Amino acid sequence: MRIRAAVLNEPHSLHIEEVELDPPKVGEVLVNVAAAGVCHSDLLLADGELGDGRWPMVLGHEGAGIVEEIGPGVTGVAPGDPVVFSIVPACRECVECSRGRFNLCVPAGENGVRGTLLDGSSRLGRADGTRLQHGLMTACFAERTVVAAESAIPLTRGIPLWQAALLGCGVVTGFGAVRNAARVQAGESAAVVGCGGVGLQVLAAARIAGAEPLIAVDRDPIKLELARQRGATHAVESGSAATVARIRRLTGGGVDYAFEVVGRPETMRLAWDSVRPGGTAVVVGLAPKGIEVALPAIGFLSDKTIRGSYYGSGDVRTDMPELAALVLAGELDLEGVVSHVAPLEGVFDALDRLRRGQGTRTVLVLDEELAGISPERQ
Ligand SMILES: [Zn+2]
Ligand SMILES: [Zn+2]
């Protein structure tokens, strides 16, 4: 079928085009995309910062929609089911999956970088025969997409899909960093460096975990205000030598956990410096390929830990129902982190805002009715 999609032809060259989408093969599903969030990783891909060879590609990896058709052998979802996309369709058999590290699934990771589905091929192409890569195995800046069945996570009904779209990347990533990577306990202190789309989810998760004090750190006063509304006990403006000193003063020597949600060496350093002896810095932010970070090694003498967290460091299949339950219980607000709502054509402005560090999340609405968004919100 022919669909409209945002295609990255080469770095800095994104176009809305009509492309050809092949039907789902064994173990795949066709999804009618309702809405998709524009994430910082989309910007890195669009600017060619994640390495060569990642184009031509249909972008988009955070989204939700309705299953329209299932390929042979699919049992977990049926046509009509609302689903959220997962960018790591875990095989549940490889060396990482067998150790329970589903977010690090080897074939999912390899095909994700290659821009293909799990059988190593693409369902996307142009009329001239050019094959197109699937952005992070999802390619949801498009009216429809074909994904591995494991990438279509059933969604509890009751959450409007324009909000549910955020669950698949920003929310899973942010909550998993707190719950699965750091395992923050009530009464432990935390700082969140970078309060954009994902950072605000880290903050919400830390608040629900009972982190105290909970310090929001950002260079943008507007984002700091949003962070306060989402439960930050303190807000510290970053960008000066006084930032670390303030965090240390607020916590009597440093936080138990500092989450870096920017993807820059200077904020990784800031997170490391903000951690107390024995504490842990968790790097969630994605840095461009080739970027290195330097840390004062003396910090290791005080039992400090630094670790990464990719896609929530857990199992998206078991985490998703819990996250949906938090939304339905009113404990996790998704609407408040959406700063802009736009049609597919809004992807260009959304990427520009990310480039300038403005706004939190833009949600692209592919189908208003399916997305369940009221005209006033747009
Ligand atoms: Zn993302
Ligand atoms: Zn696996």
Image (cartoon, grey):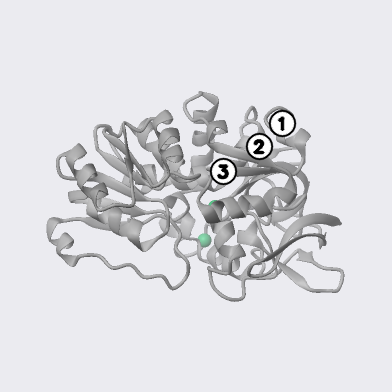
Residue corresponding to mark 2: 162
What's the CA distance linking mark 1 and mark 2?
A: 7 Å
Picture quadrant where residue 130 is located: bottom right
Earlier in the chain: of badge 3 and badge 2, it is 2
Q: Position of residue 278 (x, y in %)?
A: 17, 50
- Residue name at image x 23 percent, y 48 percent: 242
Residue corresponding to mark 3: 361
Q: Are marks 3 and 1 in contact (CB under 8 Å)?
A: no
Q: Amino acid at mark 3?
A: Arg
What's the CA distance linking mark 3 and mark 1?
A: 18 Å
Residue corresponding to mark 1: 372
Determine whether 374 is above or below 71 in the image. above
Quick check: is the Cβ at mark 1 less than 8 Å away from ligand 1?
A: no
Q: In which quadrant is the N terminus drawn?
A: bottom right
Q: Are marks 1 and 2 in contact (CB under 8 Å)?
A: yes
Answer left or right for 348 relative to 51: right
Q: Amino acid at mark 2?
A: Trp
User: Visible in this render: residue 163?
Assistant: yes
- Residue name at image x 61 percent, y 35 percent: 163
Answer left or right for 274 relative to 58: left
What's the CA distance linking mark 3 and mark 2?
A: 12 Å
